[in-house]
Amino acid sequence: MAGWKHFREIAAWQHARTLKLKADSFVRQPQFKREYKFCDQLKDAARSAPRNIAEGFGRFGNKQFANFVTIAKGSEAEVLNHFIDAHDQGLITDKELRDGEYAALKAMKAAIGLIKHLQNSPDP
């Protein structure tokens, strides 16, 4: 698929991982530790995106892969919503929200590009 030998080579996966690491850095902060359910939801959403891109890469066919990347993009939007919620709760600063939003939007843009590429490419 497009010459990738491993899912780690795919830019959309790399940006999804960066977003996951950003979420991980937030939930390690002391103020988050009291919000158990919120932390679990954020961590699950953040891990979903790179996980789905990896799983889609392992499937047969570009259309199946595109479906998994679509799920990943939805998870990235969910992470962004969690970041906004964290800001609303006073758990992260304005700058942290901007940094998180930047990472989320970059990941979603990469996912959209990958989806378009896969939908317009023939299956191997």
Image (cartoon, rainbow, N blue to C red):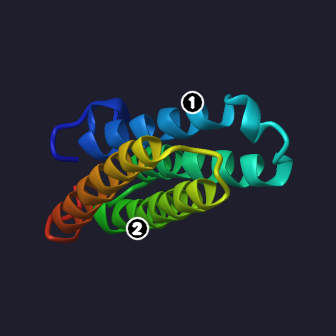
| Amino acid type, label 2 | Thr
User: Which label is found at residue 70?
Assistant: 2
Q: How many marks?
A: 2
Residue 119 coordinates in the image, percent (x, y): 22, 70
Residue plotted at (34% across, 65% down): 66
**Quadrant of the frame with the C terminus:** bottom left
Q: Gap between marks 2 and 1, in whole Å?
A: 25 Å
Query: Crowdedness of circle 1 by 10 Å Cα count: few (<14), some, many (20+)?
Result: few
Residue 63 coordinates in the image, percent (x, y): 32, 69
| Residue at the spot of label 1 | 25
- Vertical placement of 109 versus 29: above or below? below
Q: Is residue 78 left or right of residue 39?
A: left
For residue 122, which quarter of the picture? bottom left
**Disc 2 or 1, which lies upstream in sequence?**
1
For residue 9, which quarter of the picture? top left
Q: Secondary structure at mark 2?
A: helix
Q: Is residue 83 left or right of residue 105?
A: right
Residue plotted at (57% across, 44% down): 92
Q: Is residue 24 left or right of residue 61?
A: right
Residue plotted at (37% across, 42% down): 99
Q: Nearer the viewer, residue 105 or 111?
A: 105
User: Which label is found at residue 81?
Assistant: none
For residue 112, which quarter of the picture? bottom left
Q: Nearer the viewer, residue 42 or 122?
A: 42
Residue plotted at (54% across, 54% down): 83
| Amino acid type, label 1 | Ser
